[in-house]
Image (cartoon, grey):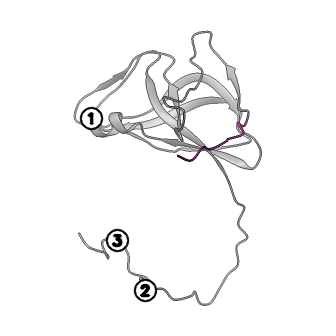
Amino acid sequence: MLEYWYKNMILKIKKLHKDAKMPSYAHHDDAGFDLCAIENTTVKAGERFAVPTGIAMEIPEGFVGLVWDKSGLAMKHGIKTIAGVVDSTYRGEMLVCIINLSDKDYTFEKGHKVAQMIIQRKEKMEFVEADELSGTLRGADGFGSTGK
């Protein structure tokens, strides 16, 4: 069995509300940590809503926070995250933007998990206009080009 040694990075969290839950990992080797609702919030079927978490964070320079679905909420209840890029310069409250894709209203209860966030190193791109791009087997074939 391989052992891995990680150096934990520091992610500063500011509670904006006394009842806000600190982010946490469900398992020791999870990539994403959980973000929780600070209040009871009902999202109607088909509605988009920004669920407040009651926390702000200081993502280190050179990194980005990516907000992703909780798989159980997505599969069982049709709850999908949207607008999930959090830049390192943002210091406001973490709002989890979601859409309810189901035909039933869904209630996030205070303290319940809404989404997960992954902190990832980012690369800065330099954009260069080109007359031609290199060829690949796929080429310009798009949606559905590899099968059903």
Mark 3: which secondary structure? Answer: loop
Q: Residue at x 51, y 33 (%)?
A: 96
Q: Amino acid at mark 1?
A: Lys
Residue 7 lies in the magenta stretch = yes
Looking at the rendered structure, the secondary structure element under dot 1 is helix
Residue depicted at x 28% and y 27%: 105
Where disc 2 sits, the SS reads loop
Q: Which residue is mark 2?
A: 137
Instruction: Please state which of the two labelled residues, at mark 3 or mark 2, is closer to the viewer.
Output: 2
Which stretch is magenta? 1-9
Residue at image point 26% right, 37% down: 102
Measuring from the top left, give residue 3's x and y in whole percent.
60, 43
Q: What amino acid does circle 2 point to?
A: Leu
How much space separates mark 2 and mark 1, taking CA atoms? Answer: 37 Å
Instruction: Look at mark 3 in the image and give the residue it sits on.
Output: 143
Cα distance in 3D space between marks 3 and 2: 15 Å
Residue 22, magenta (yes or no): no
Is the C terminus in the top left, top right, bottom left or bottom right quadrant? Answer: bottom left
| Residue 72 x, y percent position in the rendering | 33, 35
